[in-house]
Image: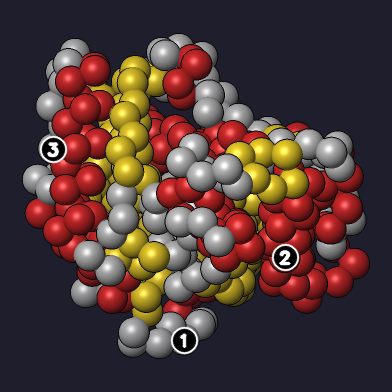
Amino acid sequence: MAGAETLLGLDIGTTKVAAVIGGRGPQVRLLGAASVPCHGLKRGIVVDVPETTQAIREAVTKAQRMVGVELEAAWVGITGQHISCLNARGQIQLPRARRQISWDDVERDMAAAVDAVSIPPDRQMIHAISRGFSVDGEPRIRNPMGLSATRLAVETHIVTASRNLVENITKCVDQAGIGVAELVAEPLATADAILTEEEEELGVLLLDVGGGTTDLALFLEGSIVFTGAVPAGGNNVTHDLAVALGVTHPVAEQIKLTHGCARASLVPEEETISLSEEEESSTSRRFVAEVIEARVQEIFRLAAQELAALGDRWPPPSGAVLTGGGSLLPSIAPVARDTLGCRARLGRPRVVSGPTELLESPALATGVGLVYYAHREAESPRAMPRRGLRVLPVLGRVIAWVRDLFTS
């Protein structure tokens, strides 16, 4: 398969780099994936360029060998506590009454929304997403193209990131020999792979529990209203176990993966586990579960605090969907349900083709979502971009994506 017919999603995380390759066509086809450990980031922030670069190179090389292609560019996920969002409104007056709304009008309206907010110079806009248009005061219009109107307004969700974070991630990808087709906020990409349109319409919170951070994406009435991250994830659970048990981090990680449970009350009191093969030391498995449960509850409390300002719109009617490698802890969904005060389920990527057993892992949800995002970008018709403004009016969940507006 030629490289031009394939898409590469690159998830650069705190504990791993995952490369997922998909094929272009009427429907996205997932072809293969590879994941390698990475210790060059902390909580989504690059702290070691050579280490991160090498992990990217290895993951991409392994994925390309699996599929038999060579790719020049990737859709790269970006996450961390330095991701933030705000919602803005733009409105324009159309030149003549009763005229049809055109691409130019949609572009001007989105630009007005972005221009209405002040973005600090140390931050860069990653996305501007239309949450819905209003035509002559009529709200919740998904696609205004072709309608006759005198006024057009748009509610816009803007995602920004630290410029230093963006530059360092881009540097690592470039040095690995891969170009950056687009930077994508990871919670948005993961939502593409995990959530259903019905959940987003009713209202749902996505929690992607990674190694260093937990990404958040909240949808209400079919549109995104919050994108962000809390600075805690699976590595915090491992650290707590290492301190509580007096063992090294690798041993604590193995204990978490082999014997961990997020609900202590489900573990028999008499059950013990060995801490070392060399020494006759053991501990209560329930104690291990108590340490894990306390940290998991804290992660979900931090998430709830981030969203408390939504008032009566919290918690969302469809509840919470958990994904990411950290979501694989047994019984984590009931802990999320009790802590967040809403229903909770485990989410796995939707895979219709390819190595299903590998790609359906929650640990690859972001990589799969990046391919879905790239496929939508590649296959959807669009107007020619001008002044760096990219607008994609599409019926459905995400209507307009604007990248690097007025940043050059």
Q: Amino acid at mark 2?
A: Glu
Say which residue label 2 marks: 298
Q: Amino acid at mark 1?
A: Ser
Q: Residues within 10 Å of mark 2 (few under 14, many from 20)?
A: some
In this rendering, the label closer to the viewer, 3 or 1: 3
**In the displayed structure, does residue 103 sit left or right of residue 283?**
left
**Count of numbered marks:** 3
- Determine which of the numbered discs, if any, sits on residue 118 in the image: 1
Structural distance between the alpha carbons of marks 2 and 3: 41 Å
> What element does badge 1 sit on?
loop
**Residue 197, how many percent across, how many down?**
69, 35
Residue lying at 86% horizontally and 42% vertically, measured from the top left: 269
Q: Nearer the viewer, residue 140 or 164?
A: 164
Say which residue label 3 marks: 72
Q: Amino acid at mark 3?
A: Glu
Location of residue 343 (image quadrant): top right
